[in-house]
Image (spheres, helix red, strand yellow):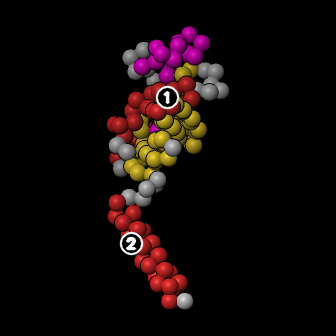
């Protein structure tokens, strides 16, 4: 009985110590914020995922709102972006030709918020992008975001 009690007390103390350590150092496997400049290339490589099912003009990211990184079986990035429509048609402009110079944004084009997920497993040469629309937004909402 004493041995079980001692085991229980020791195990509980170890769990408390580990949880305090994790809280101070960042939770292993938890999401951590990432500087938006660090994910700009990821966002631009996600253009094909942003345009699945889009038959009109290309939509492109123009503002990274936030980004997190999580260590899983590789690195998982979750990036929230504002995207907008360009003046480049999908039927006449190849994806590798899209940039700010070649495809300026349409000032009256649609404006949306999207979440891009990017899974990177370098040792397997895996780079998977997915994207989902989370909201329609207005230019006024974007202006408010820039002020905060």
Q: Position of residue 45 (x, y in %)?
A: 47, 27
Residue at image point 43% right, 45% down: 69
Q: Quick check: 73 left or right of 148?
A: right
Lower sequence index among marks 1 and 2: 2
Q: Nearer the viewer, residue 76 or 113?
A: 76
Question: Residue 27: image x %, image y %?
Answer: 42, 59
Near-viewer residue (36 or 146): 36
Q: Is residue 145 magenta?
A: no
Residue at the disc numbered 1: 125
Q: Which residues are magenta?
A: 79-99
Given residues 42 and 9, the one toward you in this image is: 9
Q: Nearer the viewer, residue 104 or 34?
A: 34
Local packing at callout 2 (Cα closer than 10 Å; few below 14, some 14-19, many 20+) is few
User: Where does label 2 land, which residue?
Assistant: 17
Residue at 58 percent of width and 39 percent of height: 133
User: Which residue lies most toward the bottom here?
Assistant: 1
Vertical position of residue 53 compared to residue 133: above or below: above
Q: Secondary structure at mark 1?
A: loop
Pinpoint residue 20: horizontal percent, then vertical percent: 38, 69
């Amino acid at each position: 009985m004493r041995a079980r009690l001692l085991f229980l007390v020791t195990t509980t103390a170890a769990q408390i110590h580990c949880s305090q350590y994790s809280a101070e150092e960042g939770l292993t496997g938890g999401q951590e914020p990432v500087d938006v400049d660090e994910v700009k290339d990821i966002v631009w490589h996600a253009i094909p995922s942003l345009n699945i099912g889009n038959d009109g003009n290309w939509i492109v990211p123009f503002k990274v709102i936030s980004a997190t990184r999580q260590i899983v079986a590789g690195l998982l990035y979750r990036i929230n972006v504002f995207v907008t429509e360009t003046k480049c048609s999908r039927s006449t402009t190849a994806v590798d030709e899209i940039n700010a110079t070649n495809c300026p944004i349409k000032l009256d084009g649609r404006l949306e918020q999207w979440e891009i997920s990017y899974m990177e497993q370098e040792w397997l040469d895996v780079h998977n992008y997915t994207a989902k629309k989370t909201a329609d937004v207005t230019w006024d909402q974007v202006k408010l975001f820039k002020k905060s």
